[in-house]
Amino acid sequence: MSPNILIIMVDQLNGTLFPDGPADWLHAPNLKALAARSTRFVNSYTASPLCAPGRASFMSGQLPSQTRVYDNAAEFASDIPTYAHHLRRAGYYTCLSGKMHFVGPDQLHGFEERLTTDIYPADFGWTPDYRKPGERIDWWYHNMGSVTGAGVAEISNQMEYDDEVAHFVKMKLYDLARGLDDRPWCVTASFTHPHDPYVARKKYWDLYEDCPHLEPEVPSMGYDNHDPHSKRIFDANDWRSFDVSSEDIRRARRAYFANISYLDDKVGELLAVLEETRQEAVVVFVSDHGDMLGERGLWYKMSFFEGSARVPMMIALPGGEGKKIDAPVSTIDLCPTLAALAEADMGEVAPWTSGENLLPVMNGSERTAPVAMEYAAEASYAPLVCLRYGKWKYTACSLDPEQLFDLDIDPHELTNLADNPAHAGTLEAMRAKAEKRWDLAQFDAEVRQSQARRLVVYDALRRGGYYPWDYQPLQKASERYMRNHMDLNDLEENKRFPRGE
């Protein structure tokens, strides 16, 4: 029988905080309990360290160069199959509550039902422009105000959103328990925390008053000591306009950790409904990308460094036992893995997907293929690519010197070995793997064409009548609660779980 599947996605959760499940010092009892019964992929990476590209890749099993979702304003084409399409074809009910950052008129991408709107716009307004290197678009680019403004609040834009996401998922899980739809289900709950701004409710903030991890392990290195891409990130984040104190850094990290505990409560609420209603389900926990959290002076994402690119990923099978997988894997591996769990056939599109089914790895097989990442959004002036292969991480960009890190001995990526003659053979081997996979000149041309087209279309569509693509959840009031085309006796019986005597 095909299993039910609950996918819990979070936003900007740093995978280095999940060395084997949540770090011991994190106040996350529900995630720790989930980790204890999960296969934990401790070296899992995003396909792209930015929301929309990372999420489109996670859903489709394809890299951004294939989905053409290069940045946070690139359309996710409706002809690209997602795990929601594959499972729906296999007979599943598919549902999304929360963020998936779909851009374009298709706001479902295979989901039969969507319970909330998205938290971000669905149009092309956030399109970067490679023709204008150094341009900063202040009204939507990150800036360091999220760090200098960190602190306590009982409600915020993001809390309001995630409270709603959790509520609707719980109501949907209760509804599915009633048994009025006999199909297996796949419900995706996608939260926006712990994404900045770094603002947390006091009860979670107070958990970290004496936390010994409020200082970054690698302090700020000074602008001139950074690699070219990191300098671009600093500039995109308008660092010169803010005086970031050591106390600002401590408060921002404290709020971030507090929001992990906030999320932990949400996870606990969802899992409690499954237990209360006696529903078995595969539970997947994953983030779209990470957050640098002040390491090296960097914040947010947009980088291939571990804090930004590495994400937590756990898969708990009903009755399964916990285990740790050290081999590097990718979030794009989840699409074929979910299809395999659901016995859904991806054969027709398999030649054009990049992800690998992880079930063999979970059962003891070795994963040997490199993990690939791409970035072609704000703070880049040309696409960047990255490979994680064994202990090695290699980064290339037509504008920048190559980078090569040995993560076994240099987990903070402080020593670039690309110019070290002792590692010339490794560099050449990694370069050959990258050149076999990518034509960087073609990649750059495709990104520029996409940006230019979207900027024209956005300018045109914002003139005159404006018809946004933002998703409007459907609420059929005439089908809710009690109405006169219903039999009250049947209604009360069918809406009760467990059933009455």
Image (cartoon, helix red, strand yellow):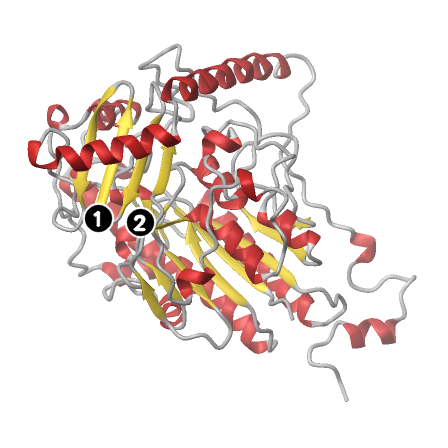
Q: Residue furthest bottom?
A: 501
Label 2 near label 1: C-beta < 8 Å? no
Residue 210 numbered tag: none
Q: Is residue 9 above or below residue 70?
A: below
Query: Nearest the camera: 137 or 40?
Result: 40
Query: Nearest the camera: 7 or 346?
Result: 346
| Image position, residue 481 (x, y; %) | 78, 63
Mark 1 vs 2, N-terminal side: 2
Residue at disc 1, secondary structure: loop
Residue at disc 2, secondary structure: loop
| Image position, residue 258 (x, y; %) | 32, 56
Question: Residue under circle 2?
Answer: 14
| Image position, residue 493 (x, y; %) | 80, 77
Q: Amino acid at mark 2?
A: Asn
Q: Is residue 210 above or below residue 218?
A: below
Q: Quadrant of residue 285?
A: bottom left
Query: Nearest the camera: 93 or 113?
Result: 93
> In the picture, which quadrant includes the C terminus?
bottom right
Residue 391 numbered tag: 1
> In the picture, which quadrant includes the N terminus?
bottom right
Residue 457 shows in this picture: yes
Q: Amino acid at mark 1?
A: Lys
